[in-house]
Amino acid sequence: MYDHLRTVIVKKTRKEHECNASIWLSEQLCEIRSGWVHLTFTEWRAVIRMMRNHWKIPKGSTCEYFVGIYDGDFFATYNDPEIHRICVKYELYDD
């Protein structure tokens, strides 16, 4: 069970971070390419940008920092805002 504690918008990251939303998206990229999900042109542009960055949030860019508790363990993740919106819109996250 996941309990969301806080979300912080980081305007400018100080170092490169792995994008948690990109992990979920990249695992389902085959289904997306096969037509299961119909992404808009802007969404495809965001996906290609993250692919070129090797699914990482580059230094100096905007990201979302999520803090929560999952099965009794504390965790924190970084997400690219556009990729996170895609994952929420098309329900790519596992509940």
Image: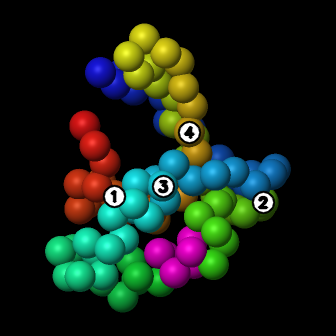
Question: Distance of mark 1 from mark 4, alpha carbons?
Answer: 15 Å
* Type of amino acid at the residue the image marks with label 3: Ile
The answer to whether mark 3 and mark 1 are in CB contact below 8 A is no
First in sequence, mark 1 or 2: give its number. Answer: 2
* Type of amino acid at the residue the image marks with label 1: Cys
- How crowded is the residue under tag 4: few (<14 C-alpha within 10 Å), some, or many (20+)? some
Q: Whole-percent x and y of residue 82? A: 46, 65
Q: At x 57% / y 31%, what residue is drawn?
A: 76
The correct choice, above or below, for 28 with respect to 63 in the image is below
Q: At x 44% / y 19%, what residue is drawn?
A: 69
Q: Whole-percent x and y of residue 37? A: 21, 74
Question: Distance of mark 2 from mark 3, alpha carbons?
Answer: 18 Å
- Tag in front: 2 or 3: 3
Q: Residue furthest top?
A: 72
Disc 3 designates what residue?
A: 23
Disc 1 designates what residue?
A: 87
SS under mark 2: loop
Q: Whole-percent x and y of residue 8? A: 56, 38
Disc 4 designates what residue?
A: 77
- How crowded is the residue under tag 1: few (<14 C-alpha within 10 Å), some, or many (20+)? some
Question: Distance of mark 1 from mark 2, alpha carbons?
Answer: 22 Å
The correct choice, above or below, for 53 with respect to 68 in the image is below
Q: Residue furthest left?
A: 36
Q: Quadrant of residue 56?
A: bottom right
Q: At x 52% / y 81%, what residue is drawn?
A: 48
Disc 2 designates what residue?
A: 59
The secondary structure making up most of the magenta span is helix
- Taking depth in this image into account, of 94 and 77 the one nearest to the observer is 94
Q: Quadrant of residue 71?
A: top left
The correct choice, above or below, for 43 with respect to 6 in the image is below
